[in-house]
Image: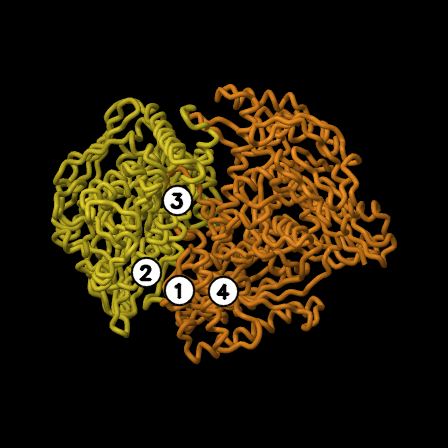
Chain colours: A orange, B yellow
Amino acid sequence: MARIGVDVGGTNTDIILETFSIDSVGAGTHRHKVPSTTQDQSIGVLQGVLEVCDKAGIQRSEVGTIVHGTTVATNISIEQNGSEIGMLTTRGFRDILHIGRHKRPHNFSLHFDVPWQCKPLVKRRHRIPISERVLPPTGEVEVPLAEDEVRQAAQTFKKAGIQSVIIGFLFSFLNKQHEMRAKAIIQEEMPEAYVCCSCEVVDAMREYERFSTTAMNAYVGPKTSLYLTNLESQLKENGIDADLRIMQSNGGLATVDSCCEKPVNILMSGPASGVIGGHFFADLDGERNIITVDIGGTSADISTLTEGDIKIMNPRDSYVGGHPVMVPMIDLITIGAGGGSIAYVDEAGGFQVGPRSAGSMPGPACYNRGGQEPTVTDANILLGRLDADQMLGGDLKVDAQLSQNAIKNKIADPLGLSVEDAALGIIRIVNNNMALAIRSNSVARGVDPREFMLMPFGGAGPVHGPALAEEVNAKGVIAPPAPGITSAAGLLTTNLQYEVTRSHLCELTSISNQNFETVMGLMHDLDEEAIQKLAKDGVAPANVKLTRFAECRYHGQGFELRAEIPDGDRNRESIRRVVENFHRQHKTDYGYSYDDAEVELVTLRVVGESKSTDLAWKPLASAEGNGLDEAFMYARETVFDDGSIHSTPRYDRSKFLCGHEIPGPALVMQHDSTSLVPPGWKALVSNHGNLVITKSS
Amino acid sequence: MENKKVDPITMQVISGALDTIAEEMGHVLYRMSFSSIIRESQDLGAGLFDRNYQTICESESTPMHIGSIPAYLRGVEKTLQDGEWYEGDVVVHNHPYYGSSHTPDLAIIIPVFYEGELVGFSANTAHHIDIGAATPGLIIDVGDVYAEGMLFAGLKLYEQGKKNAGLEKMITANSRASQQLMRDIEAQVASAQLGVMRFKKLLDKYGKDRTFTTIDQLIDYSETMLRKRIAEVPDGEYQAQGFLDDDGRNREVRLPVVVTVRVEGDSVTVDLTGSADQTPTAYNVPFEGSCKVAAFAAFRKLLLDSSKLDVPIPSNEGSFRPINVVAPEGSIFNPIFPAATEARFTQCNMMIDLIIKALAPVLPEQTIAGSSAAISFASYAGMKDDGEYWVFLEVNEGAYGGRPASDGPDAIDNLMANTRNNPIEDLGMHLPMICDRYELRDDVMPGAGKHRGGIGVVKSQRVLTPGFITHESERHYHVPWGAFGGSDGAVGKCEIYNYGARDEVANMPSKFSGYVTKANDVMAFYAPCGGGYGNPLERSPEQVREDVLDDFCTVAHAYEAYGVVLDDMLELDCLATAARRSEMGA
């Protein structure tokens, strides 16, 4: 059965179809690209899926699985058009969501916005306090749940036309009874409503973060569910009876049902596919240490993978639209730097690039859509690093003169620089902004970039690769075979995956017998729960891989770090190893460990996965001594990052074979991307078509 | 930025690198630390400084710390053990008459040597929960600076890389929370060491001369940005006056604060002459480490509002230079040794609020109505079963005055404060305390206006063991003012009662020291609410109705203050509203 990966981006929806030898057209991969339909993503997705089938010449019925990376939940949070939510909360604590952590977003400002107050996920009028009280540290009930108040609240919500209800009580991570009972009552009174409890969405300590995550879940929930179920039925109506799987923020796949229940898990679905895709292509050539840089029009997503390991962010650091969202997400950072980033001179004469972007409307000056301000793309055009007549294989008409004018008027003249120096400056500053972000995601965490390859993708990625590698001292660059569809391809390389957690605070270094028993019991329960979730998707227990973490801190600290729980028999020795792993992690992250301090457990986490078949990416035929003549297109002058100008040959990447070596200076051209090989560097075509670009000496 | 020696591109690159270093230093410090005042509240600052003690870069943590470290460094110069810096030294310093912000804010300072030469310093400051003062945590009603606990002046915690074990023992023996104190100091050392390492790498990459030329230019750049804004303010003398409740002992004596802002060209002087004399308690402001810092911050907020800038200005010495601060010796803003100075925050916040008020007539679109401009800094302490002390410091939030284009934010740290709260659940799991209430006040209304004032918070904390509470707050008498036709906000209050007898309420003054608590005593803090900005009758009736629906405003207040009439179903009665508003003079 054929498989399709479909990734929705801001501008384009990218599709990759993989067929197997048993399919009518035999084994192979087929790529396609359609404009994204921002109003309703499913139109573009459906169109793309149907077209790629036609293009490849397969029957729609041959498609067995569709894996989808979607920004639908993200966009609801960005556009702020989610559900009107009703909230039940503990009496005396109506404004936890309004107060947040009471820290301003700006230190030096009087006119700042407070997103959680002026654009609340739950309006204050819909936050209804309920009499109930659970007390720490044991979870004993001081005030029983006032069920009549819950019923009354349901009536109030009904009158207000509310369809989405959350329940957030204090200390529900110690005792879930009140939340679960209130949920049952709401469901009786409002059978149609979307209802979730904070302990179900994220079973963890810290009321604001837990309530906020729950509110975000309910905020994006109804619309996201509608989108997913609608897409599923439209595919069926069009003859595609495939399993639909969705990429989650943690890089694992989930079923439509599961995503409808916890849509908060797919807020970062889009960028996650990129990291997974980058990982896949690097892995083909055995490259284990990579920094992925997915550069689009307005932003760049950066992630660091050590020893092939995709790092998950500390849930305490995850924010979406200014709201904390404590769910597992791939550790990546997004910065406002891309092809469309605008360069300008500020009033004190400072030279800035981004984060403002020209987007696709008006777009870079050279697009001739009325943009007067120079962008990164304009700088690349002016320097001959992108060929104006080859943009999207010549499909996109651009005017290099407009780039020149914009850079001259807005940058070069005001700063007294030559147009060329100004353009180089734009490139250097945007690269520097990206480099700083790369460092904060790598060096700042104890990772030494000299042991890493930088992997740039997205259409605009590879042209910046070598300069970025140089700037962060990476050992080289890998441009994946199809930079524009790396994310879509990533969808076909990952696994069904669920995470389950339990909050349990106790000392680990000097664990008591009672806590030891409790922790053992919880670990067992979590294993079962993860296995059950996968079983519901038809995965046999034997095919489930479990990874376990203890989120710990030194007793008295406020931030947890993840310590891995060893596989195999679990006993006091495994607890000792968790403690050791924690000390080590602390040392890695902060450069210091408190060896005599008590280690405290906060949360247990189990990740269950079921391995899917990876995309089969065919190796290239060997060049076997054949030269580059066939791939040579033409030569033009190009300005490189050091300012040197060289007559530079352009090569058609589709003609490359395994083992071809391309000496710099060179530009490697393909439909939606250009890779840069600077003078003194060389590019080697790998077995699987990666371009490995390194310094020659 | 002119093109002097370093090109604008390198300058941008180094600027970004410096910001990242400062942020990383702050990050390591609060992630590693143990006391909630550092790890949750992030009451800390970190950065790099040149050998002339100028700020090169500083982390975006708490404004009160930003800009204070140069004063510490100048104080260390006068008191340094051995009189000289050596590679591997680590200095601890907190003497308020040698530049510290106040005694609990310990600085850790490491000299940066490059190619054998002292080129600058990596340093941070953090608020520690107990340094052995007269009462646990905080102190107000004490007679002199020696009652504030340990004084460190230029002492070396490490001498040329070797730990000073005696000093460590002395510190450990003199704190009620010695383990947290020592571990938090270790976190400070780790953060400062990281700064040294990163700074040296930067010097390696760009060379010493080029890096320092760039730094000088970056400082000039920030200075230029601020001077341009000051130059836009009409020259002249602007004055505003307010008062503080009391000094924490003499309950009936209000303390005047007089702020005169003199604008001359692109410089400004803040003159505090006319403010109260120094007090006999710890309610005094160290001049170098706190008073000046607050004045610097005021102008940065007012004139270089970061929410209005596309890119933030580099956080360095440049934003301090155009501002001159004058406070007569012997006044509350410039006390004479050995006056105690631990409780110095609310005076600083009042000064900033008054600077804003003074400039309102000439900067109507940049200034805002009166804010809570206080703080609620509470220390809860008691004994654990094992006989050890537990100490918890909590910073409660304030509220902003109404603003030219928007309402004042509710329940948020105000002006000089910008900390994070301690999660209620985290508190309940680790300390013998239970939070009974944490939400917006509903006993008073904030200032009415075209843009209303922010609503203060009420927080009720129950202590489960006997012990002590010390509380530093303000504005039980001096109400945050309205601006441009807006009405005044509401004063704060503080109550103590026992959970078992909730009707027997003791009204507390805004500042009290070492109050002895029984088990199950509750302290309920009510923050002041901000004043309104602009005529309330210019607020749209629809918006007032929205406020009523959200319980930000009562039906009665809508009628009284805004002239908006709502019917029983809370629908707008347009005719009655028009009539009421015209009666009110709309």
| Mark 2 residue type | Arg
Q: Chain of mark 1?
A: A
- Residue A554, labelled with which disc? 1
| Mark 1 residue type | Tyr
Q: What residue do we see at 17% from left, 50% from top?
A: B282
Most extreme residue toward the right, as rendered? A24
Q: What residue do we see at 79% from left, 58% from top?
A: A64
Q: What residue do we see at 66% from left, 27% from top?
A: A367
Question: In this rendering, is residue A432 above or below A135?
Answer: above
Whole-number angstrom distance, CA of label 4 to CA of label 3 = 27 Å
Whole-number angstrom distance, CA of label 3 to CA of label 1 = 24 Å
Whole-number angstrom distance, CA of label 4 to CA of label 2 = 21 Å
Q: What residue do we see at 58% from left, 67% from top?
A: A547
Residue A612 percent coordinates (x, y): 71, 61
In the picture, which quadrant includes the N terminus of chain A? bottom right
The residue nearer to you, when weighing A206 against B201, is: B201
- Residue B159, labelled with which disc? none
- Residue B183, labelled with which disc? 2
Residue that label 4 marks: A563
Residue that label 3 marks: B22
The residue nearer to you, when weighing B558 against A371, is: A371
Q: Chain of mark 4?
A: A
Residues tagged 1 and 4 counted as in contact (Cβ below 8 A): no
Whole-number angstrom distance, CA of label 2 to CA of label 1 = 11 Å
